[in-house]
Amino acid sequence: MDIKMKRYLLFSSLFFSSFTQAGFLNSLVDGDGLPTLTSSKKAGVGFASVAAPYANTVNYFGYIDKTVAPDANVNGKKAYYLYVWVPAAIDELGVRMISPVGDLAEPSKTDFVQKGYTEKAKDKETWFDTWIRVERMDVVSADKIRHAKKVINILAKDDDGDDTYDEKRHASYNSLVRIETEVSKPEKALVRGLYRIAFTTYKKGEVEGSFVSTVGTNVPGVKVAASLAELDVLVNN
C-alpha cells in the first residue's frame, strides 16, 4: 500500500470517527427530555467537532406567581434567587433557564423541585422572558450556608443566550451562561462554595410562569434550592 493510500485511509478513519461522535453528542438529551446542556469544550476533529455535554447536570423546576415573594429588586423589577452549592473546584459552570416548561419535561427523582410545582405547572401557557445573573457568595464551608449574606463577585449575566434549545413556542427568550474559571484571579476562580442565581424578566411586567434551571459542572454533588435554609438541609443532612 503506497503512502497516499495510507494517508487517505487515516483521514477517512478520523473523519468518520469524529462525525459519528459529533452525531452522538448532538443527539444526546437528558433523561427527563430536556435539551442537553453543553459546555464550551469541543469533542471531535476539525469541522466535525461539537460542544461536549457537561459531565454532571442538575435541574431545578419552579413556578412563580403572586404567592411567591420576590427576593430583591433588580433594575426596577422583582427578582428571585436560586442558591447553588458546588462541593469542589470546577473548571466551568453552566447555568440555563427555560420558561415555560410546558410539555418539554417533567421532574425526575433526582431533580430539585419547588413545593407545589406539579399542581401549578399544569398551566402550560404562562411564561416570562428569562434574565439571569450568576454570583459567587462569600461561603466556602458547608456549615456556613445558612448564614451567607455577602456576594463576592458577579460572574456573568444573560438575557437570550441559550443555544441549546430551538424554541418553537415563542421567540428565543431563554438564558444561558458558560463561565470558565480564572485561577490567576481569585475573585473569578470557581472554587468549592456557594453561588447564587438571580433571575427576573427582561421585558417589563411581572415574573410569572413555570421555569426549569439547569446547572452544569464537571463534579457530582451539586445542590440547588430557593432558600439558604433549604439548601443547608440538602447539603448538611
Image (spheres, rainbow, N blue to C red):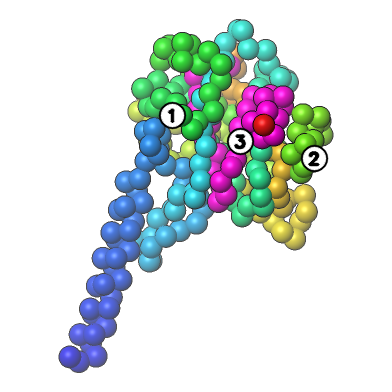
Can residue 60 be seen in this snapshot? Answer: yes
Q: Quadrant of the N terminus?
A: bottom left
Farthest residue toward the front?
A: 237
Element class at badge 1: loop
Closest to the observer, 225 or 181: 225
Q: Secondary structure at mark 3?
A: strand
Task: Choose between 109 and 217: the one closer to the eye.
Answer: 109
| Residue at screen point 38% across, 27% down | 104
- Residue 24 in picture, x, y percent from top left: 31, 52
Magenta stretch: give its range.
207-236
Say which element carries label 2.
loop
Whichever of callouts 1 and 2 sits on the residue coming sooner in the sequence is 1
Q: What's the distance in space between the residues labelled 1 and 2, CA to CA? A: 31 Å
The residue indicated by pointer 3 is 223
Question: In the drawing, does residue 112 fall left or right of residue 109?
Answer: right
**Which label belongs to residue 20?**
none
Query: Measured along the vertical axis of the image, is residue 216 above or below residue 83?
Result: below
Q: Please state if 171 lies on the left or on the right of 205 as rendered.
A: left
**Residue designated by label 1:** 108
Hey, what amino acid is under mark 1? Ser
Residue 98, image x, y percentages: 48, 29
